[in-house]
Amino acid sequence: MTSAEPLRILIIGAHPDDCEIKAGGVTALYREIGHQVKFVSVTNGESGHHQLSPAELVKVRRAETNQVASLMGIEYEVLGNRDGRLQPTLEARFELIALIRRYQPDLILTHRPNDYHPDHRATSTLVCDAAYMVIVPHIVPKCRRYA
């Protein structure tokens, strides 16, 4: 890659709004100089409100992610894992491996491994494990980047 080529940056948070809160500023800077950025929320964000039902909150969070994507000129994907129940399972790891292979990022940012929130810690573990396993060809073979 030459310095003239834009980087592909993947920012993975546990919940809708985590990417914005943790990396919104750096995303704006990356976008300003022409790099591509994609936000991913590993959970659907259904549990984070004291009055809205989970179904209502998912709709609100989806609308917010669409607004963020439009405002920042980025892709934003929300996965279907349940908020407050995320575990670093093989299924979730395989989903992230496939996502990473499809996007082919140059840089991945995510939560720190010793975060206060269990969904954040699970996301960190999933991203760390997936980022290594993405190069193993017989793991998630239908979505090989290196075939």
Image: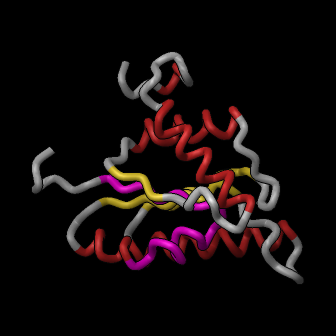
**Rendered residue at 47%/69% (across/down):** 69
Instruction: Answer whether residue 144 is magenta in the image.
Output: no
Residue 144: image x %, image y %? 44, 24
Residue 125: image x %, image y %? 61, 47
**Rendered residue at 70%/43% (across/down):** 88
Quadrant in which the C terminus appears: top left
Residue 87: image x %, image y %? 75, 46
Residue 104: image x %, image y %? 37, 41
Q: Nearer the viewer, residue 116 or 60?
A: 116
Q: Nearer the viewer, residue 130 or 63?
A: 130
Indicate whether 113 appears above or below 100. Answer: below
Residue 141 shown left or right of residue 116 in the figure: left
Residue 75 shown left or right of residue 29 in the figure: right
Quadrant in which the N terminus appears: top left
Residue 54 shown left or right of residue 13 in the figure: right
All told, the count of numbered labels is 0
Residue 101 shown left or right of residue 5 in the figure: right
Indicate whether 74 appears above or below 138. Answer: below
**Rendered residue at 39%/28% (across/down):** 145
The quarter of the displayed image where residue 113 is located: bottom right
Can you name the residue that lies furthest to the front here? 114
Can you name the residue that lies furthest to the bottom here? 51
Indicate whether 83 appears above or below 128. Answer: below
Indicate whether 132 appears above or below 88. Answer: above
Provide the residue span drawn in magenta: 8-25
Q: How is the image coloured?
A: secondary structure
